[in-house]
Image (cartoon, grey):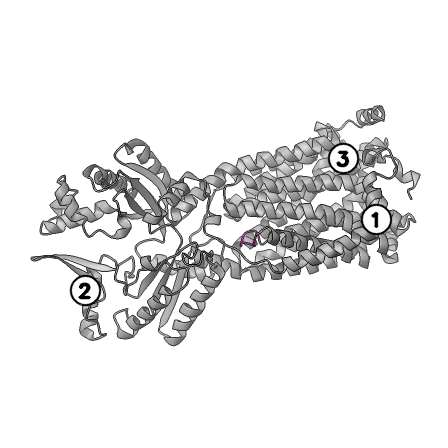
Amino acid sequence: MSNPKHDKGEHYFTSPNAEPFLERLIFNNRAIILIAFLLLTVFLGYNAVKIQPDASFERMIPLEHPYIVNMMEHRDDLENLGNFVRIAVEVKEGDIFTKEYMETLKAITDEVFFLPGVDRSGLKSVWTPNVRWVEVTEQGFQGGTVIPDDYDGSRESLEQLRQNILRSNEVGRLISDNFKSTIVYAPLYETNPETGEALDYAAFSQQLEEKIRQKYEEQNPNIDIHIVGFAKKVGDLIEGIGSIAWFAGITIVLTTLLLFWYSRCIAGTLVPVFSSIVAVFWQLGILRLLGYGLDPYSVLVPFLVFAIGISHGVQVVNAMAIEAAKGFDPLTSARLAFRALYIPGMLALVSDAFGFLTLLFIEVDVIRDLAVAAGIGVAVIIVTNLVLHPLIMSYIGITKGGINHVQRHGEKEDRKWRVMSYFSHPGVAPISLLIAILGLGLGLYYKQDLKVGDLDQGAPELRADSRYNLDNKYIIENYSTSADILVVMVETQREQCTQYEVLTAMDRLQWELQNTPGVQSSVSLADVSKVVTKALNEGNWKWYEISRNQTIINASIREAPSGLINTDCSLTPVLVFLEDHKAETLRTAVDVVEQFAQEHSNEVHNFKLAAGNAGVEAATNEVISKAKNLMLAFVYGVVSLLCFLTFRSIRAVLCIVIPLGLTSVLCEAIMAVSGIGIKVATLPVIALGVGIGVDYGIYIYSKLEKYLLEGKTLQDAYFETLRSTGKAVIFTGITLGLGVVTWIFSPIKFQADMGFLLFFMFLWNMIGSIWLLPALARFLLRPDRMVAKARAAR
């Protein structure tokens, strides 16, 4: 079954027996195991095709962060939690004061009112009764709904509507500054209060398109609809999943073609692709059985599972082709390939899994879901690519064309490998290390500019010219109040939120915020009190202050909007409108509030952050910032420990891990230079890059050590490593890099960013293992001591 010349030097990878127990267990029961694989694939594949897209506002925010804890505690008292849509209805010619426009706006308001998931009590539009005007006259306060009670579309009623709007304080909020559009504001439920079902963002976004945008733009060519909000953004991302599947298909086809060019063997091409696709189906099936769906951020994980499967499958094909070229039959070739690869393969895959599971440190459920999905995928690959793949190949074997290709190109390729083996030469290795140190220095310098959070306006997950970002740009340019709202919650005892001390503290906070870069404006109960107090005193600006007389304060806030005070007067929010949600803007505003809260919170009033979509973004950025370094430290720690337990050498660990560390630094530097921030969509790439990259180093080092233990010099050992494993590593890195580089053309910006970053990490991890690892080995490894230690252990 085995050949003595192939057992030489194999003591590190096997038990004292020529055939390890695991090998005998698998290959002596081939038929039974393959039947079990078939049944499992049918069952899990059936479940895989039923997996559904899944998205949730709460799963995309760090629920354990103090800001979010505060927000969820007061969610029933706040209107600006961050989950809402704003629908701007624009008139192309003329202004909003026409009968036709107002009829269209009323129809749209009614349509939105009945959409499932809308919090109807919080719906706001010119046509809703909670949008009112107030003025002071000689007879006292007068007010009413913005839409006149006797509105009939006549010129007189439209003029009355104009006057009501001007007196409503809604210009710049619900009505554009140029009177060319108005907004329908719709807060959303996370779960339907009647059915208890979670909001289906994909379906909700589709309804907005079909029942609002398409319907009314077709009915009235003079109308343009602009829609923004978390639900619409997520809906557009889910819609883009179709393009992700399309690009993944291109990657599979390209990988298959390149694999055939590499192996010249139909079986050696189709079997690893088939095994990797089976792994994807198993992963998706298990996820569905565990109750998971695919959210917009974890939808790329199946491709990563496919990529990892191909990476290990190429090693199996390469090892079998070498053994088949020596004259072994398919079964023996498969057994020898398994014997040589199962320990480094399992080590690499376990390292991958732990690398992905470090994402569990990040307190955002979508990232944790991604970690679980990737971890399950790697666990599945251990079975499909280290068991299923060799078993199938043990029946089929490498074709004659594949064997001839190995034999025909052996001597020609040897010249190339001989040149590359000089990476381990005593004269070349120092130059490589010098280049690596220079690259590390440049990477550390440029990565200083790396930011946590979004660096652009709008939705950075989508292209700048996407419909969503164009809609967002329109609203920013035509409305005074931003869509990026930071809500500061001011807590008091029951019935104490209108006390003079509370309102004056809020007023001081607003003064500081309004003099903070990035803050557009702010609104609170203190503003209402000052405006009404002035109005009660004949509009005299000298009275534009918070009165010390509690009776006057109570009178001034009697008609305060519900969103600025809760029912038992124990909470009143300060709404802060930001220019954008860029990381720097959020950090600056949050720092001001935190400093103020620390200095001014007391037993009477307590300032707490934060609600609103900007508050959620700020909390998410803070969680990611704190978790990033912990995550990297853990992933490198676990990878180092596993490598040490396997190779029993600190020097071996350094040879494998140092190239990975250089790749991580350079990746962060490229992100900084390219204007890509660390956020929910991009942070996983760093961990995934380390997890996948460690495979290359483990395969290279395991072979290099094997040949060193046989007594070869370092350069000769590395030459043999390149002839066997090295060419498979180079092919894998290039193939996977070319596969993901096509993603840069995706309409989904975060997929394009991930494709760009993964392309770099696939290629550079491969380069690091081929170029830098042997240079490090020249200085770190001591082959004579390794051989002596191995002989003593026998």
Amino acid identity at mark 3 = Ser
- Pointer 1 or 3: first along the chain: 1
Amino acid identity at mark 2 = Gln
- Pointer 2 or 1: first along the chain: 1
For disc 2, the neighbor class at 10 Å (few under 14, some 14 to 19, many from 20) is few
Residue 549: tell me if it is visible: yes
Q: Point out the image quarter for the C terminus.
A: top right
Q: Position of residue 145 (x, y in %)?
A: 21, 62
Give the side of residue 526 with respect to residue 192, left or right.
Answer: left
Disc 2 element:
helix
- Pointer 3 or 2: first along the chain: 2
Closer to the camera in the image, 539 or 563: 563
| Up/down of 756 relative to 154, above or below | above
Closer to the camera in the image, 124 or 742: 124
For disc 1, the neighbor class at 10 Å (few under 14, some 14 to 19, many from 20) is few
Amino acid identity at mark 1 = Asn
| Up/down of 731 relative to 90, above or below | above
Residue 522 among magenta residues: no
Give the side of residue 105 with respect to residue 733, left or right.
Answer: left
Q: From the image, tell me which residue sits under label 3.
A: 424
Q: Position of residue 627 (x, y in %)?
A: 51, 38
User: Closer to the camera: disc 2 or disc 1?
Assistant: 1
The magenta segment is 293-298
Per the model, the C-alpha gap separating discs 1 and 3 is: 43 Å
Per the model, the C-alpha gap separating discs 2 and 1 is: 86 Å
Q: From the image, tell me which residue sits under label 1.
A: 29
By secondary structure, the bulk of the magenta-drawn segment is best described as loop
Location of residue 651 (image quadrant):
top right
Closer to the camera in the image, 553 or 699: 553
Q: Position of residue 749 (x, y in %)?
A: 52, 55
Per the model, the C-alpha gap separating discs 3 and 2 is: 83 Å
